[in-house]
Amino acid sequence: MVKQELKDCLQENISNIKNTFHHTSDLIARKIKTDIKSSFEISIVYLDGIIDTDCIQEYVVKPLLKPFKTVEFNESLIDEMIERFIEAADVNITNQYNDLIDAIVQGNTVILINGYQKGIIVPSAKWKERSLEESLGERSPRGPVVGLTEQMKTNINLIRSSIKTPDLCVEAMEFGTISKSAVSILFIEGTVDKGILMEVRKRLKNLKVKYLLNSKVVEDALEGKPKTFFNLVRTTVRIDGVTSSLYEGRVAIIVDGIPHAIIAPTLFMEMFQSPDEFHIKMGWFTNRIIRMIAFILAVYLPGVYIAIANFHKKGLPNNVSKALITKDELMPTFWEMVFLLFFIRILFDSSFRIPKSAVILLSLIGTIVVGETAVTAKLVHPVSLIIVGITAICSYLLANRGTLAAENILRFLFMIVANFFGFSGMIIAATIQIIYMVSLKSIGVPFLSPVIPFKLEELKDIFFRSDLQTLINSKHTYTEDED
């Protein structure tokens, strides 16, 4: 954008501002005249509906309507106004027209004086926001319940209330050529990994967008290229999720208007952690093992069943083979699984698209169609229904950790491999999957770290939760990309 300075003619500045805003009806330009002999013509410009009018009335308008004290030199009038009349806590001065426009858009009030090529910016934004609520996306039986909101300043306030140290740093950035959106990078100086912080800054600076309506654009920029179906950064709506990541030397990114924070880097083994593990004694050893088993079942179980049905049923005892696999159904095992998984995906998607009052009815219809009608009509085998049910439950166990996309894609790929090549093909495909995951990096950190590459000192919070005092006092280190 071309830099343009303000004019010394008040009417010309007001006219330019109105033209820039296309004469929108909510742009207010109020004129004020001082009651001294050599009166000055002043205009207060703001967007109605997004400012705190009571604040502007009390701390700007009323003081300006009072008689001015004698000013010896016209050049010092703006300084005189700021120091003696405007009672706002924070005031800025600019002579750049673009800065003035940005300030108005962001909910600030601008004061212009006839004969001066400078404008005074008074912060006055009052954005509508919902009250603090419980974090519904990542519920926990114990621990903090308040989740992040859409207002970035509120989120930073909540984080600072948990991290009471001057080392907590906030770096502000803006993105968008049509509409600017604020983005903040949060980290703890002295704790943050410098290499990770530099890489985050570098990737965000390369982000070029017209506007920013969601955080997925920022997530994609942080993940870099080539694209992958694994989440190389994760999001959290919990305050303790953000604070614990910052204490571990990571970086948090908050986008204004988005009720969650982005955490970078993100490692695969973190997908099996949950907030409640750090607040209760139960499950400190078993919870993560159970989630790992659930991930394995969600990805491989349908493929294993298809491989047994197509290639390996002769290796089973006759009674087991007859119970698990029969030829009475209309569809082959592979298409049974595809049909059932497709139908459950429709049910899952529909539950978010219909009114809440109809969700129970939807689940009832789904149970009748899949659970009874399909089996009675011998469209699908009952065991296929059980397999798909277990797979769906295991998938949704880790859905809020960002594994759903990877599970869906891997599951379908392994089903195809199992349908044509059996267990041998699945073993080869699983080996390729591991090699592929080893090649992935999150902000330069190996995705499978600290398992691959192996770091013994970092395993204390991987497969199980170690002693909390040990975890709190330990320093986390990250193996960075050497390229």
Image (cartoon, helix red, strand yellow):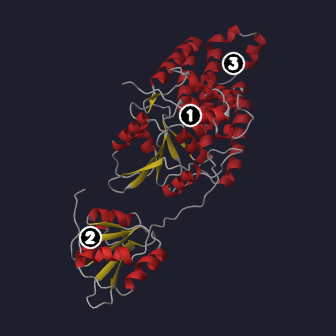
Indicate whether 122 appears above or below 161.
below
The tally of labels here is: 3
Q: Locate the N terminus by quadrant.
A: bottom left
Q: Is residue 259 left or right of residue 40?
A: right
Residue that numbered label 1 is attached to: 403
Any part of residue 378 in sight: no
Q: Residue at x 25, y 79 (%)?
A: 114
Circle 2 — which element? Answer: loop
Q: Amino acid at mark 2?
A: Lys
Mark carried by residue 327: 3
Q: Amino acid at mark 1?
A: Thr
Indicate whether 282 appears above or below 19.
above
Residue 55 place in picture, x, y as percent: 47, 74
Residue that numbered label 2 is attached to: 118
Indicate which disc, 3 or 2, sits on the residue closer to the N terminus: 2
Residue 181 place in picture, x, y as percent: 40, 54
